[in-house]
Every structure is written in structure tokens, then in C-alpha cells.
Image (tube, rainbow, N blue to C red):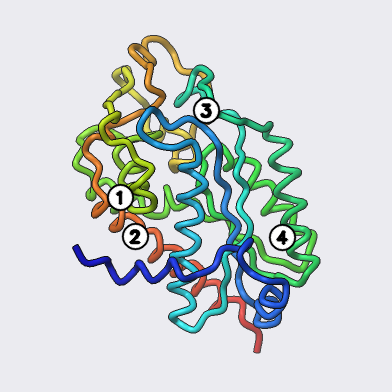
């Protein structure tokens, strides 16, 4: 099967692959820089521990590639490969391989990384949410540094950004979460050699009737920050995932990434159009 045109995005270098003069040239061109927030955590028996980090880098590369094609200077920045302990709504117990850091540690780490970039001359920093649990520290850092430095930091939570179209791409009829159909689709597009589809198993929580409007977590666009779920929400939970990963395909993964890339590109272009001087 022929590779989609978007596969050219893999030619975009990662931050660690660039040289110092190349970064200096990007700064001189007022390039936007994308810093993704990943994680090292369990994703069931079918996905690797670095799934969030890989997806974050993939999103950044695809966005940078699209922007460069449209003549907009942008580079992939450093990635944060660790996140806070997963929300209890998704992972109520420990699993081997997961490496958590505290919310405060992530906030400090991200702030110092961004201050380094700002000190070198970057003025447009986009923080890509690739690990949902990293959302609160990410928001704090973006707000504080935007208010206290010359840089403009913008957070990109694509989970909300593509929500109107995302469910229409899924085969599953129930909501998908950590390691479910959507995430497995993206990993099949990003690193198919690391996906063990023969190990994919479905699991869904027991959700009570009468859930109030907008009663879902903030990183999904909801209005409730709930971190302890009542019984029997986790009845039968064992593999560490939520959803129907066995329904996933690389083709749908590419479509999801296309949605995300379209949305991020529109944000960056809007920022340029509304902040350009003279």
C-alpha cells in the first residue's frame, strides 16, 4: 500500500538531531517551537510505555512539516518524557514500567526548559499535550511565563480541539480512553512495529445513570475535576486500558493525525495574523 503524502513529515528533524547553528537560524527566523509533554507509563499489554511521548513528537513533526510547507518557520522542540501519576479515573493502581513525577516537579521542569528557550530568543512556544495528566502544570507554566516574559506560550490540547469530528472516525460505540481504539490507531500510524494487536483487549467502566451535564474531566473539555471514582466504576479493570483497542487501524490513525494537524495549523496561523506588528 502506498504511503500517504503526509509521510514526508518524518524528514523534519527532532530537536536532539539538530545542531546549535541550526537552532540559532530558527531563532533568527522567529520560528515557532513545539514542546510536547509525553509520559513513561503503562498502556496495557499491546502498547509501549512511551506511547504518549511518541504521539507528541509525531504531532509536533506533522504540524511543523505542514507549517514549513506553507512558508511558516517552525521547529520541533525538546520533549518532556515524564508526567504526573495518571488520573485515578484511568489507572487506579501501579503497573510495572510506569515512571511518574509529581505535578510540581513537572511544573518546575517545564518552566526551566521554556525559560532556557526564551533566554535563547524563542518568542513563540507551543506546548503540545500528549499526556492528559500533564495539563494542569502545563497551563500554569504557560500563563505565568506569558505574563512575565516577552514570549507567548500557547497550550495545545488537541483532545478538545478535534472533539467535534474525532468520534465520527471511531468504530467503537462507547467512549474511548487510555490505550483504547483512538490511541491504538495513532500508534499503528506512528510505530506499528511496537503495537501488539494480539494482546489488545477491550474494557469499559461501569458508569452510573444520571450523569450531570459536562461531568467529565477538564482535559476532555468538561467542567469537573474528579480524581476518585465510586464503585463499581472499576469493576473488572485489569489490563490498564479503557476502550476497544482491537478495533484500531493505521488508516484511522492517519485521519486522526490529519485532524490534529489541521487544527494546530489553524491556531498558529491565527496567532500570526493577530499578533504581527506593522
C-alpha distance separating marks 1 and 3: 22 Å
Q: Which numbered disc covers residue 146? A: 4
Earlier sequence position, callout 3 versus callout 4: 3
Earlier sequence position, callout 2 versus callout 1: 1
Which numbered disc, 2 or 4, marks the residue closer to the eye?
A: 2
Q: Residue at x 72, y 77 (%)?
A: 21
Q: Residue at x 32, y 48 (%)?
A: 188
Q: Residues within 10 Å of mark 1 (few under 14, many from 20)?
A: some
> Where does residue 167 sit, x and y in percent of width and height?
27, 46
Mark 2 highlights which residue?
A: 259
Question: Quarter-wise, where is residue 47 in the image?
Answer: top left
Vertical relation: 89 (above or below) 67: above
Q: Which numbered disc covers residue 87? A: 3
Q: Residue at x 37, y 16 (%)?
A: 237
Q: Residues within 10 Å of mark 2 (few under 14, many from 20)?
A: some
Which numbered disc, 3 or 4, marks the residue closer to the eye?
A: 3
Quadrant, the C terminus: bottom right
Amino acid at each position: 500500500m502506498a504511503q500517504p503524502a503526509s509521510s514526508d513529515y518524518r524528514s523534519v528533524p527532532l530537536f536532539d538531531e539538530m545542531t546549535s547553528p541550526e537552532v540559532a537560524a530558527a531563532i533568527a527566523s522567529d520560528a515557532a517551537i513545539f514542546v510536547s509533554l509525553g509520559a513513561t507509563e503503562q498502556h496495557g499489554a499491546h502498547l509501549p510505555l512511551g506511547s504518549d511521548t511518541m504521539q507528541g513528537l509525531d504531532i509536533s513533526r506533522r504540524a511543523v512539516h505542514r507549517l514549513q510547507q506553507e512558508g511558516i518557520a517552525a521547529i520541533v522542540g525538546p520533549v518532556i518524557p515524564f508526567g504526573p501519576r495518571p488520573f485515578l479515573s484511568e489507572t487506579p493502581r501501579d503497573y510495572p514500567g510506569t515512571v511518574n513525577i509529581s505535578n510540581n516537579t513537572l511544573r518546575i521542569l517545564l518552566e526551566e526548559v521554556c525559560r532556557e528557550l526564551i533566554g535563547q530568543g524563542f518568542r513563540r512556544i507551543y506546548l503540545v499535550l500528549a499526556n492528559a495528566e500533564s495539563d494542569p502544570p502545563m497551563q500554569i507554566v504557560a500563563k505565568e511565563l506569558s505574563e512575565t516574559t516577552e514570549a507567548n506560550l500557547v497550550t495545545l490540547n488537541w483532545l478538545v480541539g478535534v472533539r467535534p469530528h474525532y468520534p465520527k472516525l471511531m468504530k467503537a460505540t462507547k467512549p474511548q480512553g487510555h490505550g483504547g481504539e483512538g490511541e491504538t490507531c495513532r500508534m499503528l500510524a506512528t510505530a506499528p512495529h511496537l503495537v501488539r494487536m494480539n494482546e489488545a483487549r477491550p474494557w469499559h467502566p461501569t458508569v452510573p445513570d444520571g450523569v450531570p451535564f459536562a461531568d467529565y474531566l477538564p482535559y476532555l473539555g468538561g467542567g469537573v475535576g474528579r480524581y476518585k471514582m465510586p464503585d463499581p466504576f472499576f469493576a473488572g479493570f485489569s489490563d490498564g486500558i479503557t476502550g476497544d483497542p482491537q478495533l484500531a487501524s493505521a488508516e484511522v490513525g492517519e485521519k486522526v493525525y490529519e485532524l490534529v494537524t489541521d487544527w494546530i495549523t489553524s491556531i498558529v496561523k491565527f496567532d500570526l495574523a493577530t499578533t504581527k506588528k506593522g
